[in-house]
Image (cartoon, helix red, strand yellow):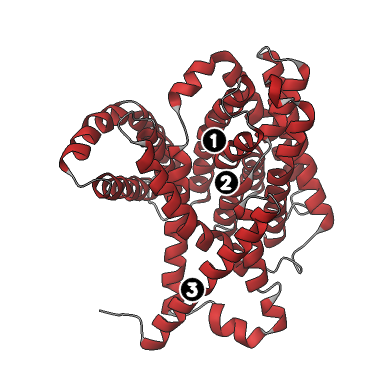
Amino acid sequence: MESLGHDEVIKLLLQLSIILLAGRLMAELARRFNQPAVVGEIFAGILLGPTVFGMLAPDTFNAFFQAGGASFLVFEGVIQVSVILLLFIAGLEVELQLVWAQGKQALSTSIMGLIFPLAIGFVFPFYFSEFFDQGAEAETFTFALFVGTAMSISALPVIARILMDLGIFRSKVGMLVISAAMINDLLGWLIFSVIISMMGTSGSHMSLEATILLTLAFTVFMLTIGKKLINRVLPVINRRFAWPGGVLSLSLSACFLASAFTEYIGIHAIFGAFILGVALGDSAHMPERAKEIVHQFINNIFAPIFFVSIGLKVNFIQNFNLWLVLAVLIIAFVGKVVGSGLGARWGGLEKRESVAVGFGMNARGAMEIILGLVALENGIIGEQFFVALVIMAIITSVMSGPLMKIFLNPAKA
């Protein structure tokens, strides 16, 4: 049985140590400027990666972070697990009862917030694919569909944090934004999973039709029968297993099992983790304290590893294209703000509240970056578009809160 050599083990441990330390330091610095921790973690990766460290000390950078060797494969495996766990806790944030309670307003806001940016994000890359840096492995239709999907998905954890910071999480507007973002994410991730299967890079030998059918069946099963089974099993686990170890270990076991299933049928593993998280998080028997422990564990260990690793993969200076960044930003802002705002307006909200909802839904954050990295690895997009996507995710996350505050008086929300 092949194993890591002495030097490879040292290299892997040093990589993880440096990444966690740099990620924590930059996250704390970001928080001092009232910015999300993810912003600091991404900047830590840029400093450690080929953009800064690789330019200043190329030999040392290659010694620590150059691709190749057994330790690199293990490190990539850790990153894959990190992405799966991030989508799992994103799913835990979804409360289906809250979605149903918002009814027409949430549905119109989410549908318009999905369709409008998806349409705008599809049209321009479809006719100007070279400008938008189409990946070498993707057809133009697949590339344009991905860009549209990337423009339509919001970042539920980032949105929740913004609403809490503004003090309007439990308000009428806050509940509408959260509910619409939940529906938006469910539909958006389903579309993205289909895109990956269309690429034929998943490794599955199933046909596209079979993959889509099994994906829909899995989603419906987990959100209906699966959720009922979870509600029956969780009380038994809480009574008979050590707490919180029992519920935590079995929850993560179910997460990896669902991820393995969706990966097997040709859909990326992150979709299985997300749907399992939705079904589990919606259970009344999943204690809030257990959710908090999972969040703390993943957000402070696995999240920094993933977000710092982003900067290690791409040179942000060499691949920075100003016009592409501006184009992505314009499409992102116009598509999401106008689409979600119109949906909220048609749902019965006042004009200023509708605009505030549009800016609230415009926060992209971690979800867009995860999408971009998966697309980059599958050859759907090039490095320039990936850099533009990361910059767009950071800017929309930073600006959503202040722009909501301009159009909405929290005291009256």
* Residue highlighted by disc 2: 367
How crowded is the residue under tag 3: few (<14 C-alpha within 10 Å), some, or many (20+)? few
Disc 1 to disc 3: CB gap under 8 Å: no
Q: Earlier in the sequence, mark 2 or mark 3?
A: 3
Tag 3 or tag 1, which sits nearer the N-term?
3
Q: Crowding at label 2, few (<14), some or many (≥20) Cα neighbours within 10 Å?
A: many
Q: Residue furthest top?
A: 348
Q: Nearer the viewer, mark 1 or mark 3?
A: 3
Task: Report the quarter where the C terminus lies.
Answer: top right
Residue 48 location, quadrant: bottom right
| Location of residue 174 with respect to 34 vertically, above or below | above
Q: Which residue is mark 1?
A: 185
Percent x, y of residue 97: 44, 22
Q: Say left or right for 205 vs 14.
A: left
Q: CA distance from mark 2 to mark 1?
A: 9 Å
- Amino acid type at circle 1 is Asp
- Mark 2 in CB contact with mark 1 (< 8 angstroms): yes
Say which amino acid is labelled 3.
Ser
Q: Secondary structure at mark 2?
A: helix
